[in-house]
Image (tube, rainbow, N blue to C red):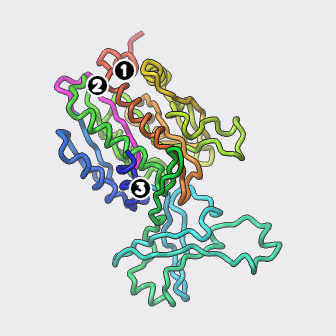
Amino acid sequence: MLSLLRELVEVPGGSGSEEDVAAAIVQHTRDLPIERMLDPMGNLILTIASPAPRGSVMLCVHMDEVSLVVRHIEENGRLSFSPHGLIDARTLVSTQVDVHSQLGTHAGVIGTKGSHLVTQEERARPLGVGSLWLDVGARNHDEALAMGIRPGDLITYRPNFREMAHGYIVSKAIDNRAGCAVVVELARKLAGVKLPYDLHLVAAVQEEVGARGSRVAAQRLKPTMAIIVDTTPAADPLTQPHEVSCEVGKGPIIRVMDMFFDLLLGTIYSRPIREWLMETAERFGMPYQATVASTFSDAATVHLTNQGVPCGGVFIARLCSHSATEVAHVSDIENASVLLYEALRVLTGDLLEKIAQPRRL
């Protein structure tokens, strides 16, 4: 899992530019007897077809990482930029990045006014993206253009995967390459299993900018039910339990509800699916956490597609969210993979119908 995750987090893939991530997932599943499709939006769909399906399950992760885009090239050669996803500007100061232009990838660093020169009044003001710039070494506007840099070019955090003590890991893009690693593991384990339903493993695009790709995939696949696998902010020394109750290293999270009020995006997760996931975890003696979260996931759009898709959510706790140095625990990722494998393996056609299909009263 560690070597797979290391490879996946180092692949650049901001929203709308996930093709290299999709290629990496395909490479790791190329020898499996499964169907593969890349839809027009860029979603990767891996299907394990049943010989006699009694419905279908869509298990969805997203491939994109939070990133930046070039907004303007200044006359002095420095770049102004915009966030591509929810990023706190305070996490960007002095961060090393890669700028992906038509002529290649260029090293850069994000800067702001030096601490020796900041006034007390400036120090008291919130830091915004407008107070930052990106330096790629270009000495003027024309040199930046000669490097192939143009407005709209993707900017990603520099690869920086490291193992810490006691199973903790730190890297860019743990959100949600951890989920992508789970998809690869599930494909490997379930490819030869005769399931009583079609299983669609979806690696979706553009989650960080409003869960867009997953909506398109769900509209195409029309699943009987869906399970979203993602990462989620965890408790840290400065948060209170009523703000965040899940913890890194305490097992995968089975989500009850979420809502990101700024975008009015969220999901009330299906109770029967939650209970099935929790019963599976308890049956196999796996640790798990149950939470309500102040965020959103791909479920926010998936559950509203077609005639409604009941959704469950299995999440992996992370610290330092949406920064260049996200922190997670490898056991949470491994346990999420095992939980989902066992749950999907024991899911019968009868249980799928009981959980997800409409009933006459």
**Total marks in image:** 3
User: What is the number of the mark on residue 68?
Assistant: none
Where disc 1 sits, the SS reads loop
Instruction: Identify the residue position indicated by label 2 in the image.
Output: 55
- Residue 11: x %, y % from top left: 37, 60
Residue identified by numbered label 3:
9
Tell me which numbered mark, 2 or 1, is placed earlier along the sequence. Answer: 2
Between 344 and 332, the one nearer to me in the picture: 332
Outermost front residue: 165
- Does the stretch in magenta take in 354? no
Point out the frontmost of discs 2 and 3.
3
Instruction: State how far apart marks 2 and 3 are (Cα).
Output: 33 Å
Instruction: Identify the amino acid type marked 3.
Output: Val
Residue found at x 63% / y 63%: 89
Residue type of the residue flagged with mark 1: Gln
State the separation of the CA atoms marked 3 and 1: 37 Å
Is the Cβ of the residue at disc 2 closer than 8 Å to that at disc 3?
no
Considering every residue shown, the one lying at the far right of the view is: 120
* Magenta segment boundaries in residue numbering: 49-63
**Distance between the alpha carbons at the discs numbered 2 and 1:** 9 Å
Amino acid at circle 2:
Gly
- Whether the residues at callouts 2 and 1 have beta carbons within 8 Å, the answer is yes
Q: Position of residue 194 (x, y in %)?
A: 21, 26
Dot 3 and dot 1 residues touching (CB under 8 Å): no
